[in-house]
Image (cartoon, rainbow, N blue to C red):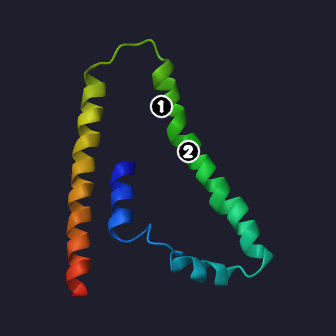
Amino acid sequence: WGARLTYNFVIKGGYAGGEDYRWAEVRSWYPGWRFELFNVVFICGYQQLLILAFATPAVAAAQSVSPLCALDAVAALLFLSLLALEATADRQMYAFQTEKYR
């Protein structure tokens, strides 16, 4: 999942330098110190909560002594299927957006 997102970021020029154009718009909503407060509370704080939300079940599963079962295989298969679906949608969207500006 992370590799898919990184790949999309790279092909769209994400590491070419500069800042995402949307941040200028967000900064205009909260001028001066208000943006810094927004950044610390919402952006940084929310990201930490998201990391905690998806890491906690992974830690619990890693510490479990129960063996893997059929439900685990079904969950893994579902994840891989949805990941393939997202990757296909990413390719289609990239082709559409690229063709639009050709």
Q: Quadrant of the C terminus?
A: bottom left
Q: Is the residue 65 above or below the residue 30 in the image?
A: above
Badge number at residue 94: none
Q: Is the residue 51 above or below the residue 13 in the image?
A: above
Q: Position of residue 38 (x, y in %)?
A: 71, 68
Q: Residues within 10 Å of mark 1 (few under 14, many from 20)?
A: few
Q: Residue beneath label 2, please?
A: 51
Q: Secondary structure at mark 1?
A: helix
Left or right, 29 with respect to 32, comes to left
Q: Is the residue 94 above or below the residue 3 in the image?
A: below
| Three-letter code, disc 2 | Ile
> Toward which corner of the image does residue 98 lie, by quadrant?
bottom left
Residue sitting at the far front = 16
Q: Name the foreground residue: 13 vs 50.
A: 13
Q: Name the foreground residue: 77 vs 16.
A: 16
Q: Residues within 10 Å of mark 2 (few under 14, many from 20)?
A: few
What residue is shown at x 44% (from left), y 66% (from top)? 15
Q: Position of residue 36 (x, y in %)?
A: 74, 69
How far, Cα to Cα, is label 1 from label 2? 11 Å
Q: Secondary structure at mark 2?
A: helix
Left or right, 80 with respect to 21, comes to left
Number of disc labels: 2
| Three-letter code, disc 1 | Ala
Q: Name the foreground residue: 25 vs 7.
A: 7
What residue is shown at x 55% (from left), y 42% (from top)? 53
Q: Position of residue 89 (x, y in %)?
A: 23, 62
What residue is shown at x 52% (from left), y 78% (from top)? 22
Q: Which callout, 1 or 2, points at the residue further toward the start of the chain?
A: 2
Badge number at residue 58: 1
What residue is shown at x 39% (from left), y 64% (from top)? 9
Left or right, 58 with respect to 27, comes to left
